[in-house]
Structure formats: structure tokens, C-alpha cells
Image (spheres, rainbow, N blue to C red):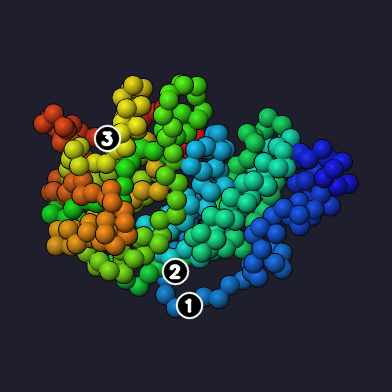
Amino acid sequence: MDFKKTKDVILLAHGDGGLLTHQLLKKYFLPHFNNKLLEPLTDAAFFPVKPGQIAITTDSFVVDPIFFPGGDIGRLSVCGTINDLAVSGAKPLYLTASFIIEEGLQVAVLEQIIVSMAETCREAGVAIIAGDTKVVGRGQADKIYITTTGVGYVLPEANLGYNRIEPGDFIIVNGPVGNHGLSILLERESFNFDTKVLSDCAPLHTITEKLLRQFKGIKFMRDLTRGGLATNAKEIALASGKDIWLNEACIPVEENVKGVTEILGLDPLYLANEGKFLAIVSEKEADDMLIYLKKGLFLHESCIIGNIKDGKGNVYLKTGLGGTRRLNMLTGTPLPRIC
């Protein structure tokens, strides 16, 4: 049986480990993911290990829709896992990728996702060295789910931890927040807004690596994914036992994001991002780091958005009207399946 006879859709037999599985790998996955560590197709990949610490992380991606302005589930599955390593102070090297595919998915759609993953890996300088594919019946999944696991070396300059956060530290973000979550929402629903919001989905490690090598005063980093800036700030405040004070006027939000969220009654501080991080840095180095982000890395919308104070794990927002608002974690699921 070949793909012409299957009418170019995924069949249950593509996941049985037999001839169709073999053809799927040979024709679609291997030409795009090709590298020397993956090529043998043995039960495990082998790679050399250098002295030092290794970081590993894993994440699953079930975003709906699977294609959206600024990205797709393939690019997201690579960037999401890379970014978890990046904000942990690691240099990503290798990924594994597992696919749960719904019977009936067009092979052309699968290939488009594979190509996107391969292009993002080349952009990021990482390789997919192991993987798995399973096919489930119609209605038992929604098109495709991807799980990626990432491995990287912890940079010797990285010294990150909740225990290093102290009063007087400053909080910096690398650009406008809220784009990814709103992009998914607008693509999924039919609001008919004239504006288009692009996801910020992008690998962050080239930025974080340069920062960590240059600024020893960086004490903690976090990528601002599910729950957005507000939820992640609350998690950091609780874990560190310090209060976080944010200044609403300093938090960058694109005008189109601001406009649409105001109409829909959403708060951009709770919307997910896939290419933004928060860094907590010593007061002494905060200004220099901001200048480097803007002039050295051309991230012109980077901002100091707040600072750390003694406290009990609360997050406060100084509003544009001069008031103070307490921020808590996101509750409920107003925007499910955004990653």
C-alpha cells in the first residue's frame, strides 16, 4: 500500500509499526528531521556528554487551531520546550518529539507541521534526535497533539533561583505581552475584528544566553506562557516569599492587543505569551541590562516593569489611574488549549 491508495490521509495502520509506519517515517519525517543521531532509528539516541549540569524538560502541545497567525503547533512545540530550557539558564541542544495523530488527518497537513518544526529547529540550532508516532481513531483526538522533550547544558554563568530574589531587585520583560493568547482566540472564534494579532511564538535562548553571559546580577527568569504575566508573577512571589510590585504604565502592550482586549473584557496581563520572558535582576545591573536589550539585541520594547519588596508573596499593580490592584493567579479556563 502506498500513499496514493490511502487518499493522502492518515490511517490507523500508519501507527501500527508496520509498512505504513515505515513509509511515513521515511517519506515525511526523516527527510526534514535528518541528522546523524536520528539516522540509525534505533530504540534510543546516543550523544556525547560534556562536564557540567544537564537540564531536561518536557511539554505537550494541544493548541486549537493548529495553524494561527504567527505560528502553528509544530513551531510552538519546538519553541515552548526550548524556552523552558532557556529561562532555566540552559543552552538547548536536542529534542525528542512524540506525535498523537487523529485518523483522517491529511498527510499534507502533517507534512506542513513537520516542515515548520524542522525550520524552527534550524533557526534555533537544535536537533530532533528521537521520536514516536501513534495514530488514534476519529474523534479520539483533535487532529494532532505533540509532546517534545528538551535536553541542554546549563550555562556555567547561570545562577538562577528563587533564593536569590531580594528586595530592591528590578523586573524586566523583553517586549509586549498578551499576543499569543489573543492570536489563538481571534483565530478560533469569529469576532470579525479588522485587526490581526500575531503570536509572538519564538525561541528565546539566543537572547537569554547572551544576557546570562554578560549580567551576573540576573537572579531568576521565567517565560510568560499559560496564565500570562500576572499568574507567573504570582507564582514567583509565592515561591520567593517576596512581594512583586508592577507598574501598569510601564508594561508594554501593543495597541491592537489593548484595543481588542478592552472590547472583549480580557486582561492582557493574563494572556499567554510564547516569546516573552520576565527577568529579575539586581538594581545595580538593571539599567545596563535594559540598554543592552534595546541597543545590543534590538529589543526596543523591553521595559523595567516593576520591582521586588519585602512581603508575603503578593503581587500588586500600580494602575494607570493611580490606584493599586492585587493580582492573583488565573482561575478557570477562559482560553483553553492555547499551547
The earlier-in-sequence mark between 1 and 3 is 1
Image position, residue 292 (x, y; %):
25, 61
**Secondary-structure class at tag 3:** loop
Contact between labelled residues 3 and 1, with CB atoms less than 8 Å apart: no
The earlier-in-sequence mark between 3 and 2 is 2
**Taking 305 as reference, is 49 left or right?**
right
Q: Which mark is residue 328?
A: 3
Who is closer to the viewer here, 117 or 14? 117
For image coordinates 85% across by 43% down, the residue present is 4
**Direction left: furthest residue:** 322
Q: Amino acid at mark 3?
A: Asn
Image position, residue 62 (x, y; %):
55, 39
Contact between labelled residues 2 and 3, with CB atoms less than 8 Å apart: no
The earlier-in-sequence mark between 2 and 1 is 1
Q: Which mark is residue 50?
A: 1
Contact between labelled residues 1 and 2, with CB atoms less than 8 Å apart: yes
Could you tell me how far apart the alpha carbons at marks 3 and 2 are, in whole angstroms? 33 Å
Report which residue position mark 2 lands on: 153
Please rate how many residues cluster around mark 2, counting C-alpha atoms within 10 Å: few if below 14, some from 14 to 19, many from 20: many
Who is closer to the viewer here, 66 or 314? 66
Image position, residue 303 (x, y; %):
23, 49
Asked whether residue 226 appears in the rendered view, the answer is no
Asked whether residue 180 appears in the rendered view, the answer is yes
For image coordinates 35% across by 60% down, the residue present is 208
Camera-near label (3 vs 2) is: 2
Could you tell me how far apart the alpha carbons at marks 1 and 3 are, in whole angstroms? 41 Å
Please rate how many residues cluster around mark 1, counting C-alpha atoms within 10 Å: few if below 14, some from 14 to 19, many from 20: few
Q: Is residue 263 depicted above or below 60 in this figure? A: above
**Secondary-structure class at tag 1:** loop
